[in-house]
Image (cartoon, rainbow, N blue to C red):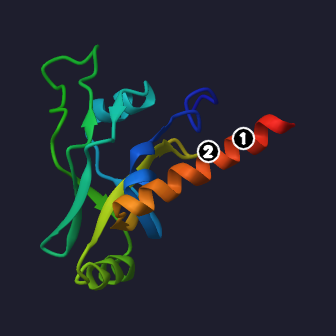
Amino acid sequence: MSKNISGKIEIKNRRASFEYQFIDTYTAGVVLKGTEIKSIRMGKVNISDAYCYFADGELYIKNLNIAAYEFGTHYNHEPLRERKLLLQKRELKKLQEKLKDVGLTVIPTKVFINDKGLAKINIALAKGKKLYDKRESIKARDVERQESRKF
């Protein structure tokens, strides 16, 4: 595995921290096809519209757009297909129990390549923010920006 590939790719869902308040975070593996990992290593991933859901006791991610591999042939993957997320059974059960609460959802926050060269997705159990919470986030960010300019 070459050093320039692993650990360099990190695609974040910056909108998620503005729209949601994170309660708990997990790192999950993802089931991919051959050309998908190549596209991820090239950084051609859009995570902004993605969301997670449970089906038959397993966690899936939907609307994760991994662009078609440009050098792929007829074996190329479908960009918006559903992909299975890999977590331990106890983590899945814990997430499923917490999702029974009203207003909670599971959203992906980051796609990255770990030091072994495997694609991972950080997911968060999150609660949607109200409008006044969003204003609070904007104020805090502006104050922090003002403080950093003083120095």
Report x, y in % for residue 14. 45, 43
Which residue is drawn at the image coordinates 59% and 38% (left, top)?
7
Report x, y in % for residue 97. 28, 85
Question: How many angstroms separate mark 1 from mark 2 (CA)?
Answer: 6 Å
SS at circle 1: helix
From the viewer's perspective, is residue 146 above or below residue 90? above
From the viewer's perspective, is residue 74 above or below residue 97? above
Name which quarter of the figure residue 3 lies in.
top right
Q: Which amino acid does label 2 sit on?
A: Asp
Which residue lies under the disc numbered 1?
146
Q: Residue furthest top?
A: 71
Q: Which of 28 and 102 is in front in this view?
A: 102
Which residue is drawn at the image coordinates 35% and 83% (left, top)?
94
Crowdedness near tag 2: few (<14), some (14–19) or many (≥20) residues, C-alpha within 10 Å: few
Marker disc for residue 46: none
SS at circle 2: helix
Which residue lies under the disc numbered 2?
142
Q: Which amino acid does label 1 sit on?
A: Gln
Disc 1 + disc 2, Cβ < 8 Å: yes
Report x, y in % for residue 5. 55, 29
Q: Nearer the viewer, residue 97 or 135?
A: 135
Residue 109 visible, this orientation: yes
Report x, y in % for residue 34. 29, 34
Left or right: residue 37 compared with residue 24: left
Screen quadrant of the N terminus? top right
Crowdedness near tag 1: few (<14), some (14–19) or many (≥20) residues, C-alpha within 10 Å: few
Left or right: residue 8 compared with residue 12: right
